[in-house]
Amino acid sequence: MMATNVRITDIVEETPSTKTFFLDASLDYIPGQYVMVWIHGVDEIPMSLSYPNAITVQKVGDATSALFKLKAGDRIGVRGPLGNGFVLKGKSILLVGGGVGTAPLAPLAEKAKNKNISVKALIGAKTDRELLFVERFEKSGDISIATDDGSRGYKGTIIEVVSKLDLQEFEGIYSCGPERMMSQVLNIAKNTGMTRMAQFSLHRYIKCGIGVCGSCCIDPSGLRVCRDGPVFNGEQLMDSEFGKYMRDGSGRRILI
């Protein structure tokens, strides 16, 4: 699949470290799917779609730093949408997001509301300034917030909020954010017999995006995050590398 050259139409600063880049192309996609974004002359990196025509990006490395220097009117390359996305099930769902990981959960919440599915969103960040898409979640259902410094909502981690809930009230759990957070959600789901009903969006080093190079395979199953994911249910992730380690571009293990 060749990249399509698209123009940036608008850039919105969401938080001090996160921006949304709106494009002049709208994609028919499932929340949780991603696109490969080619920053000309720098690199091609995977990014979740936060709207049909936008990606929401946190500045964390050379490629995203170069992207942050672009202005409305500049062009980037886009391949996709790629991967599988979240599968909506049931009539009452729980969303658990942390940091920029909430980006693919916001359109999922909106899609669920449009299907008359009850949405409970738990959103965590270090501070209130780093909270993302709060209004979108508020318009889609009930929301609870946790910040590390207590500047908004519960003071502490979003996992502490999850542990206070009766998960049996929900027919599905959807999570995206730091993997350490998601692995704790998986443990809670396991203890309540909801492993298979929980879905997680994984971040791995993705090169090709089409399942050829094997850079993003998960131990020990060999499932490819780029093509078999990035969304997996809890049963697929049990007894895997999930929550323990990932690999960098050279294949070296990086502890989580």
Image (spheres, rainbow, N blue to C red):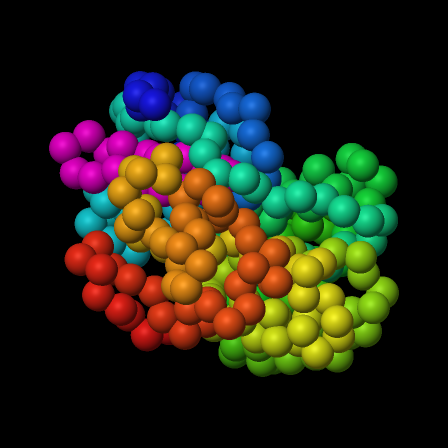
Residue 224 position, x and y percent, is 41, 48
Could you tell me which quadrant the C terminus lies in? Answer: bottom left
In the shown orientation, is residue 82 left or right of residue 158? left
Residue 124 vs 200, above or below: the answer is: below
Q: Nearer the viewer, residue 114 or 3?
A: 3
Q: Nearer the viewer, residue 132 or 96?
A: 96
Residue 39 vs 244, above or below: the answer is: above
Residue 72 position, x and y percent, is 34, 27
Q: Which residues are magenta?
A: 33-50
Residue located 45% across and 19% down the image:
25
- State which quadrant residue 60 falls in: bottom left
Q: Nearer the viewer, residue 230 or 105?
A: 230
Residue located 23% across and 45% down the image:
63
Residue 129 position, x and y percent, is 49, 61
Residue 148 position, x and y percent, is 52, 77
Task: Give the residue furthest to the left.
Answer: 41
In the shown orientation, is residue 252 left or right of residue 50? left
Task: Give the residue furthest to the front.
Answer: 221
Secondary structure, magenta segment, majority class: strand
Residue located 57% across and 75% down the image:
184
In the shown orientation, is residue 86 left or right of residue 64? right
